[in-house]
Image: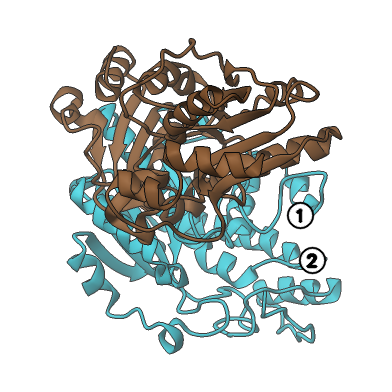
Chain colours: A cyan, B brown
Amino acid sequence: MTEDKRSELQAFALKVRERIIPMSTDGGCFLGASLSAVDVLTYLYSEFLTIDQSTLKDPKRDYLFLSKGHDVPALYGIFAELGWIENNRLANHLSTSDHIYWHPNREIPGVEFHAGSLGQLPAVSIGVAMDLKISKAVNRVVCVMGDGELNEGSCWEAFLVAAAHKLTNLIFVIDRNQFQANMPTEELIPLEPLVDKFEAFGMKTQRIDGHNFDQIAEAFEQTNNNPGPHVIICDTVRGKGLPSIEARADRWFCNFSAGEITELLNELHQKGSAVITAETIVAR
Amino acid sequence: MKTYEELLRDTALADERFVVMTAENRALVRNLPSVLGDRFVDTGITEQTMLGAAAGLALRGRIPVVHALAAFLTMRAFEFTRTSVGIANLPVKMSSFIPGVLSDGNGPTHQAIEDISIMRGIPGMEVYAPADAQDLVDMLPTIWATPNPSYVRINTRPAKYDHAPYEHGKAEVIAKGDDLTIVTYGFMFEASLEAQRKLTENGFSVGLINFRSLKPFDGEAIRSLIGQTKQIISIEDHFITGGLFSILAEFLVKEGLSIPVHPIGFDAKWFKPARLPEVLAYEGLDAEGLVKRITQLI
């Protein structure tokens, strides 16, 4: 990847984070899980997926399904940056005047399917990938999942089916931010060794730094050369970009004051360190 | 008359949108893989993945007809049906094998006797229970043509009655009667018809209605009974909770109508597993048992 391209992607991701952070006030959002997924989603929509504003409903587009759902602020931040939705629409978060809430809604241009119930969209992605194969189409299907989501048995059932049906056009992306709702994954339901598990299920598996655009690009380019189904495990940091909330078990769902949002935006731009006093709502 | 499999084969061959899916339940579709090629999809014993994948196929414009044993099709996969198929209201067509007493010797794990109750709770989901093979094959082309998801209690028993053509969402009125009217659906139609004939021989004036479509529900068929028959007997191989008896109760209360209704079904219990005729005799659901129970009620 050229220096310019890397800088361009980093700048884009920074703008997306700027859009996400204000969504964590006045009702709040799942901020940490959104920030961990920003970089891979930035790469996918900027570089990898064959889709733009004019092809959002084109049957020849690539599909991205956001299975973990909680990270939808990242998706909407990207759609706003790309101009698919108006910038000021994000201010409608949690208002009945729009469809922007804690999980994806198909009324928003660019959202392929509603999500929120973990372990559902691997199967839906399989159905789309099956149809593309039946139709002899070359579109690709990307399903973005959380690591905590992998507790759901239906994920592993879907991996078996994806491998059995040789869905070479299907890529599962795991946002491996090490946390599920309330605690580190390895303290509740240990997932490692994750590469071995996916390999044993018949997936072409890669593991990368999910905040390194060179590694992200190389991994996705690899999927073009090898028939899948693929898994790309992205090692990420929950809350990436905001050291005051990074990798903290108690910063899953965040509902900050307006003053704290200002401090967090300063922190994002490395102009000081935010002092957070708000109680986060852990048991949602 | 075509069989279920022949109808499905011809429908899928004539319309590229149709995809036949099964969670390794091939009893009804054994000859289709060679005919349909990659439009026959067996996902293995994975009812959840099958329903989710059916939603994905439907998103791309396909009409998946999905097959599994009734208990697992409805209950194992329920959240996938409700959430991936139901919320998006996608035209996934569910064919439910061995529903109700048709699971005969399998035991309670396989007894789908709450299926009508839970499937009709999904907004947009249509629910059908044909009386026999003739009713089934007559109804399916209409069911598969609607833009909504549907659930069909598959019933391939040979017909013992020459049904009127299916009219979408309408009940089939077999007979009118002053003393009582039996309302029923699906497999229980056969024994209900025999019971109606015997009760008539015994001097009662007995009506009979086949509720082949449970959702949409033909409320007008019930409204027309008010003042015309003294009481209604609902007969179903389903829990009394949530099935036809409940549908009747909801309709009558909502419309402010009043008529005595006596439910015959499973009252908060699973049935005794055995060969089918023995199940029916033991549970009082064969014609003889029904005649006895109904005579006691009136």
Q: Is residue B4 visible?
A: yes
Q: Amino acid at mark 1?
A: His
Q: For the C terminus of chain B, give its image quadrant.
A: top right
Label 2 close to label 1 by CB (< 8 Å): yes
Determine which quarter of the picture holds residue A132. Answer: top left
Residue at mark 2: chain: A
Q: Amino acid at mark 2?
A: Gly
Residue A232 is drawn in which quadrant?
A: bottom left
Closest to the observer: B15 or A179? B15
User: Judging from the image, what secondary structure is the residue with disc 2 in?
Assistant: loop
Which of the numbered marks, if any, corresponds to residue B128? none
Residue A82 visible, this orientation: no
| Element type at mark 1 | loop
Q: Extreme front residue here?
A: B202
Label 2: few (<14), some (14–19) or many (≥20) C-alpha neighbours in 10 Å = some
Looking at the figure, which quarter contains the N terminus of chain B? top left
In the picture, measured across the screen, residue A107 lies left or right of residue B190, that is: right
Query: In the image, is B18 to the left or to the right of A282?
Result: left
Q: Give how far across and how far down residue A115 sits, in percent.
A: 55, 52
Residue count near mark 1 (Cα–Cα under 10 Å), binned few <14, some 14–19, many ≥20: many
Of residues B80 and A176, the one drawn nearer to the viewer in this rendering: B80
Chain of the residue under label 1: A
Q: Residue under label 2, please give it.
A: A27
Residue A183 percent coordinates (x, y): 53, 85
Residue under pointer 1: A93
Viewer-proximal residue, B54 or A4? B54
B35 displayed left or right of B20: left
Left or right of B39 in this view: A185: right
Residue located 60% across and 56% down the image = A72
